[in-house]
Image (spheres, rainbow, N blue to C red):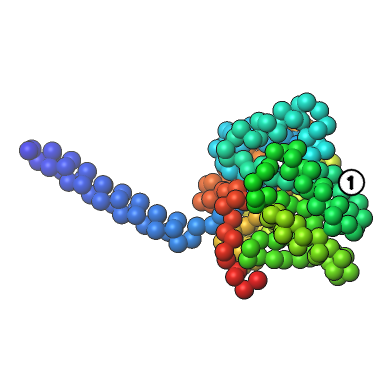
Amino acid sequence: MTAKNYRSYFSSIIFLSVYSLLMSCNSTATQISEKTIYITIDDAPLSGIDNILSAVEEENVSITLFMVGEHILASNYHQEMLAKAKQNSNILVANHSNSHAHEHYQQFYSSSSGVLDDMQINNRIIGLSKEPFYSRLPGRDVFRLPNLKTEDPYITQQEDENERIDFDALYDHGFFLYGWDLEWSHETSGKPIQSVDKLMQQINYQFTNNSTQTKNHLVLLMHDQMFADHLNGKENLSTLFKALKEAGYKLSALDKYPINQNADN
Ligand SMILES: [Zn+2]
């Protein structure tokens, strides 16, 4: 071996050693601080659905799609969107009621049997037959999971007292109810309020301050109509997916949300 070959040989060894050391540090750090984000998109299928399905496919990420029966049945196109969502194994198709309470929430939640009927009708429309039925209630931010039970912080105490019975009855009938930790908010027009950068700051803040329902797991709410063409929806959603991946967050659907933590709840 010539002197030149020796130099080359030893620099390769040094490079490989440093490289493997860096890789092992990196994977250790990931394991220790792994943080998972559950992107949940409500009210589908509406005007953003096509862009949502394309962005999810292109970026190869997992999301949960909370679907509304009356929106699915609105046209053949909307039914095709349901079928397309169900074909993508990265998408958890979940129940967001048949009627969405027709936006009259107090009236809707005044009847436990009515709420249960509405949710069960939507199970049949979507084709959900196996418990647990992954669900989010229209207009209500509540969790009902084996070890996580929270009440809606946005309704009055009186409403809460009237409605708890509905939430508990749904849980008893096999529905897992999911609220959220943070919302990507939108104007009435559907236009997103926070920029992706702002949303990333809010996500980092919640993890840093440990202010999610389950430590290191954040449920992020957004709505289908935010991703319509005229709002640049596909690009906005793809930008968010890329930013989350680059920041090292894991993206999962809600069937991976831990259900055995917060055992004191
Ligand atoms: Zn909704």
What residue do we see at 78% from left, 26% from top? 76
What residue do we see at 68% from left, 59% from top? 181
Horizontal side of 50 relative to 155 (left or right) equals: left
Q: Quadrant of the C terminus?
A: bottom right
At which x and y percent is residue 233? 71, 36
- Front residue of 84/198: it is 84
- Front residue of 136/181: it is 136
The residue identified by callout 1 is 102
What residue do we see at 71% from left, 31% from top? 81
What residue do we see at 76% from left, 50% from top? 185
Q: Give the answer, above or below, for where 184 lies relative to 209.
A: above
At which x and y percent is residue 56? 61, 37
Q: Quadrant of the N terminus?
A: top left
Q: Give the answer, above or below, for where 225 lies relative to 150.
A: above
Q: Quadrant of residue 36?
A: bottom right
At which x and y percent is residue 46? 78, 36
Badge 1 amino acid:
His
Q: Residue furthest bottom?
A: 264
- The residue at label 1 has a CB less than 8 Å from ligand 1: no
Horizontal side of 109 relative to 7 (left or right) equals: right
At which x and y percent is residue 52? 68, 36
